[in-house]
Structure formats: structure tokens, C-alpha cells
Amino acid sequence: MRLETLRGRDLRAVAAEARRAFGDDAMILHSRTTTINAVPMIEVVAGAAADIERLRDLCALDVPLRAAHPAAHRVSPRRRPYCVALVGPTGAGKTTTAAKLAVNDAAFGRLRAGFMTLDTHRAGAVEQLQAYADIANAPCEVVHDRRELAGAMRRLSSCDVVVIDTPGRGPRRGPEDDSWRELMRAVAPDETHFVVAATSRLDVLADAHRAEMATRPTHALLTKLDEVADKSAAVSIAGTLSLPIRWVTDGQRVPADFHLAASTLLSSGGAAMTVTP
Ligand SMILES: Nc1nc2c(ncn2[C@@H]2O[C@H](COP(=O)(O)OP(=O)(O)O)[C@@H](O)[C@H]2O)c(=O)[nH]1
Ligand SMILES: [Mg+2]
């Protein structure tokens, strides 16, 4: 899935450029005006129609949890809170995003969220999540091993949703790496979001994705959209992972920098412009 950012003096010029790049099926996903060296320019993100359709499917197929599950735990066949786990490389933004999920209304509306963390080895990891939990006034359970799991779930049973934070996998694997994966199997989350930075290189990403296959990600969650010049990098990642995307983040502010993917990656809710000659 390839998108390109193109700039020109007017829409006719960029449309011609888009057709040169993508042929007669070229479509424009976003357009905005900008200035380069004080000269007004139009900037568009363009791609082939089929790719834009595919992106729209990835973003839109998936409805927000609060719409699908107005009272998540009551519809859970296991009569427990709806469990949403975050996996992915270290530094991708899992813990920060967990905090955003618990307090941003765009995530779970007014459902009551709690936290569980399986990231127990790294210094400061529990404290980081606990600090967010304190601010959100949400319960936070630290689970070191299988024996602690049932008790933690019981204490979280008044929540509608439990957001599960995990350590991820650093560039150098440690022996502790697999114990949390076993715990993940025991938890069997209802959703597992593979959290990746939009700044990730595609080859590194493919490697990280392979490492997370065991946790069976159901979604991709793109972070750090604020660190890329435009959205084409994020779109390439979405295409590579080929997982539904419900949420994206674009900054360090908790909980503000958090959005529904459809409204961020697709302009005006998904209306792309056809480029006609
Ligand atoms: N610029 C930017 N930074 C982010 C975003 N999300 C998280 N971060 C930062 O990335 C760093 C790592 O985040 P953290 O949540 O600890 O990552 P984790 O290792 O996956 O849990 C922190 O400095 C966060 O503030 C984002 O959307 N944009
Ligand atoms: Mg973390």
C-alpha cells in the first residue's frame, strides 16, 4: 500500500502529478494548502484507488468498542471485564496509550476502565502505569505470574474494561521475555492491539510483528503520528500489518493526543477524491 505526498501550485498540477505516479486510478486522500518559501502551494496525499479502498476498510470495518459493547462486561461470554491488551516493541507508546485509553472518552465512552500490567521486570514500569492509574482514579493490578491472575481479575471485576499493559520486546531479548507471553495466553484478551510507532522502519516492523504473532494481535494501533511529516508513513504501516486500526495517537499528552483512526487517517470520514483528467 503506497501513498505519496505531492505538492504543486494548484489542484490541476497535483492531479496531473498524481496520475503520473498512480495512473488513471489515482485518488487523492487528503489535501491542504501550505506555503513553501512564502509561495502558496497545495499539498495532497494521493494513491491508487484500490489502496485507498483497502485503507478505508482497515479503518472503518471496526466500530469503536463503546458502540459495539455498551456495557462490555455484561456481553462478555466470560462474565468478566472486556480485556484489551497492548503489545509491541518497547518504546512504541504502550503504557502512555494505556493511560489514554482509560481516560479519553473516544476510547470507551463512560465505561469504567481498570489497568493490569504484566510488565513487572523493567525498573520503573509498574510505577509509570500506577502513576497514570492514580490520576485516572482507576484500579491497577500488577500480575507477576499465573497464580496472581485470578485474584487480580476478581479485584477488577467492577470495571467494564481492563487495559492490559505488557513489556514488549526490546532489541536484546532477555530470558524473562517469554513469561509474560504465557500470562497473555492465560488472560486470553478479547482484543490485542499491536502498538507501533509511525516512525518505525518497515523492515524492523516486520520483525517486531513476527515476534508478536504468538500473542495473536487483533488490531494495529499507530502511535507518534506527530513525529512523521505526513500520514503516508502510517498508511504504509497499516498496509503492511493488514490489521484493523481503531485508534491512533499523535503526541505525549495524556489523554488528549488520542483519536479514532478513521477520522485521522481518512479525510472527512473517508471521502477520497477521484482524480479526473
Ligand atoms: N511524540 C510522541 N511520543 C509518544 C507518543 N506516545 C508515546 N510517546 C512517548 O514515547 C515514549 C515511550 O512511551 P511508553 O508508553 O513508555 O512506551 P512503551 O515502552 O511501549 O510502554 C514516552 O516518552 C512517551 O511519552 C505519541 O503519540 N507521540
Ligand atoms: Mg511500557
Image: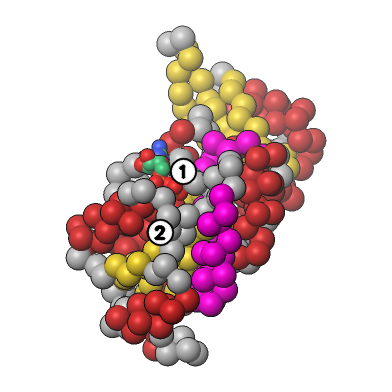
Q: What's the magenta region?
A: 174-202
Indicate the quadrant containing the N terminus: top left, top right, bottom left or bottom right: top right
The quadrant where residue 213 appears: bottom right
Question: Which of the marked residues, 2 or 1, is nearer the chain's N terminus?
Answer: 1
- Tag 1's secondary structure? loop
Magenta-span inclusion, residue 191: yes
Disc marking residue 21 = none
Q: Is residue 259 left or right of residue 111?
A: right
Using a 10 Å C-alpha cutoff, classify the residue at mark 1 as few (fewer than 14 neighbours), some (14 to 19) or many (20 or more). Answer: some
Q: Name the residue located 74 percent from the left edge and 50 percent from the top edge.
A: 50
From the Cβ of disc 1, is ligand 1 less than 8 Å away? yes
Using a 10 Å C-alpha cutoff, classify the residue at mark 2 as few (fewer than 14 neighbours), some (14 to 19) or many (20 or more). Answer: some
Q: Nearer the viewer, residue 70 or 5?
A: 70
- On the image, numbered disc 1 is attached to which residue? 91
**Most distant residue in the right direction:** 23
Q: Nearer the viewer, residue 9 or 81?
A: 81
Residue 121 placement (x, y as % from top left)? 42, 55
Disc marking residue 120 = 2
**Most distant residue in the top direction:** 37
The quadrant where residue 194 appears: bottom right
Q: Nearer the viewer, residue 64 or 10?
A: 64
Q: Name the residue located 28 percent from the left edge and 54 percent from the top edge.
A: 127
Q: Is residue 213 left or right of residue 255?
A: right
